[in-house]
Amino acid sequence: MKKLSLVACTCASKLVLLFGLLCASANAAVYPGGEHYIAGHTAEAEARYADALKAYEACAKIDEELAGFARVRMGACRAKAGDVAGAVKHWQALLVTAKNEPWALMARAELGMAFQRQQQHAEAVKHFETVFAQPLTPRWLDAYRRAYGDSLIASSDGKQRESGYLLFESMLEEARTRTQRLEAVRRLANAPEVRQRVEAAAAFVYSAEWGNAAGTLNTLSAATSGKQQEFATQIAYQRARIQLAVDSDKEAARTALLAIAKAHPDTEWGRLALMHAARSYHIAGEEPDKKPKNEAASVAEKRLSYRATAEKLFDLLATQLPDTNETAEGLWWLATRHAEHDDDPARVDVAIKTFLKLAEVCPSTERAPEALCRAGWLLMAKGDDATAGVHLLRAAESYPASKFASAAAYDAGRVYLAKKDRETAGKLFRQAVESGGVGNFYAHRAAQRVVELGVKGIATGHAVPTPGTGSFLRALPVAHRPAPAPNEPWLERTRFFASHGYEEAEWEVLAQSHLMMDTQKAGPYLSAVADTGLAATASYIINRTQWGLADKKPLPEAMPALYPRAYWEAVAATARETNSDPLLLLAIARQESLFQAKIESHAGATGVMQLMPSTATWIAKTDPEIGASHALNLTKPASSLRLGGFYYRYILGRNGGNAVYAIASYNAGPGNVSKWRNRYPTTDLDTFIESIPFDETRDFVKKVLGNYAAYHSVYSPGNQVAEAEYTLVGR
């Protein structure tokens, strides 16, 4: 990273301050009360509630557009300061004259939360019912949904209690994160229905919450013994899994699992029992030939016995339970466990054999085409291109609708290109483009190959400028010009709120959801909403309504909404400062967070660019161009984007200007990428990407590059965005 003189540092710091002020001012200038509103939010976040109240009140007096939300926030400040009764009266007074204003929904939600905390559940339910009467209930509402469910469960009305538990059951089914899942399952663990309690125990087992799982099963008293019979097999399986995880006597747990598998081979729980027994025996006998010198002969013999038992059980899965998800998952686990040992040719051979066995015995499962692809890749890494090509062709031809079809066709094309069969390679690359489409990494890689080979009859765009890689990706045409964004006050307010990461933006969209439910009018609204930064909500609406989708694949008109220019002003500013492609910054942010300002990973990474607080602080302190203050506000989109942009610039420089290595470093850390580059010394980037040992990182690199190429396909000069707009950021 470049060094600056003291004078330069001082100047840079001033520029940073100026940048922050300009961004805030530009955002607030639209509204006369904007600066007051921002000041109110800042004071509220710092628990200076008296100052926040004054700022919001000042905003409400001079700004009609922001007044409603400012008054709602005044109530929130009262509640946070301890005057809950005063807050309730304040919100109730606001709602007397409220009609369909977006802030009214927010006020009702806050009232519901206040009543729920005061255990006035009937009142809470009334207000929550209004909120959840809306046609859409995106996931950002989960905290309110949980409170709604808690109030229903606490109701004296039996039907309401039942509705509460059903609500948590639906939340469990929809949960995408471990935290969301556990929030729902803790409620279900106390449900009166045995079915729901057993379901809760299963969810605890899935999340490796063994103590909670055991505790939930222990609540199934003798009084419910009759009802338990229906779930006896599932309960027995869960108890065996818990025992396997927490008891020192693993053998007893394995015996229990095998007994369940033998007694109930045609049930999901019997199949799962056999799979987990096989996995446990394999773990117990792993690598018996590499035993410590002091290991007793009896122990070594036992480990060999465990390994033999595991092999028999995996064979039993394949022969007696073919084409089931449980068998596919068991064989996938076994194959990937062997493949991790890529320094041991014998283990790699077993991995290949197991992947191919999975494809053979479980051809109808989702794992089958993926297994053929992984086997093909491992064979290519060994230098056995001929055999690899056979299996890759099978994956491409037998599973044309699979999400792995493009990958299979591309890698098969590479095999035939290495054999100098340019004609077959060209056909396969063309197939990869057509089956993958815009946003698919392999489709954009294949498009570049198509151009290099001069394949006719398939349209491609310009070469995507991927630093340090040569001509690596190519854009694909998107034959759609988005309609102009609607010029409506609520959208302008949404943009203002979203730019600061305020939840008010979501309430604006929720109140106008009827516009996006109308598939005749939805397009411009969804694109505009996504551009404000609420891409996750726009994506949720698209999936819910199926607007712009055909067979779950996006149509051209949906592309601007699925690949939005979210927080464009902040992105453009960061791109100028870091000499980066703004579309690459968008590609990273889309994959990291789908532009959600306050999202936090299980590891603690926060914000749009998903930075760890320690990394953000380090970047801010080591580069005077940034300013340490930015590290303190990762939930503000502009700050997160700025820190993420500077971090990407740093790791790009550390990786010799190679974007592929830099993107991998962004996910796994520069240290890991340095190790991998030494371990896999190849100049072929396809090989490097497929060799990345971390599944998450390997997938991340492909998706970011796919996003990047998609952005170039949708927005580059000569397509949907005017050249002047794109070159504005120095590209």
Image (tube, rainbow, N blue to C red):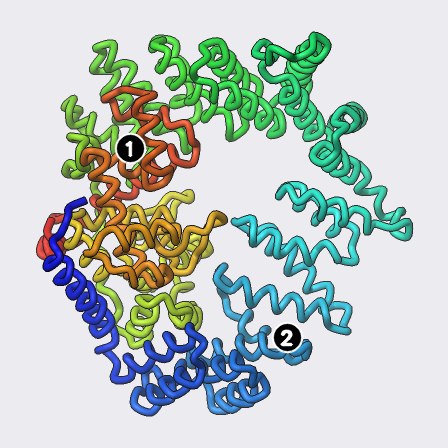
Camera sees residue 308? no
User: How packed is label 1: few (under 14 Cα within 10 Å), some, or many (20 or more)?
Assistant: many
Q: Could you tell me residue 18's position as x and y percent?
A: 17, 68
Q: Could you tell me residue 35's position as x and y percent?
A: 28, 80
Query: Is residue 262 placed above or below 670 in the rendered structure?
Result: above
Q: Could you tell me residue 25's position as x and y percent?
A: 22, 74
Q: Secondary structure at mark 2?
A: helix
The residue that appears at 19% across and 56% down in the rendered structure is 625
The residue that appears at 28% across and 55% down in the rendered structure is 620
| Residue type pointed to by label 1 | Ala
Q: Nearer the viewer, mark 1 or mark 2?
A: 2
Query: Residue 378 vs residue 174: left or right?
Result: left
| Residue carrying label 2 | 116
Lower sequence index among marks 1 and 2:
2
Q: Could you tell me residue 301's position as x and y percent?
A: 70, 9
Along the line of sight, which residue is nearer the eye, 610 or 104?
610
Along the line of sight, which residue is nearer the eye, 52 or 594?
52
User: How packed is label 2: few (under 14 Cα within 10 Å), some, or many (20 or more)?
Assistant: many
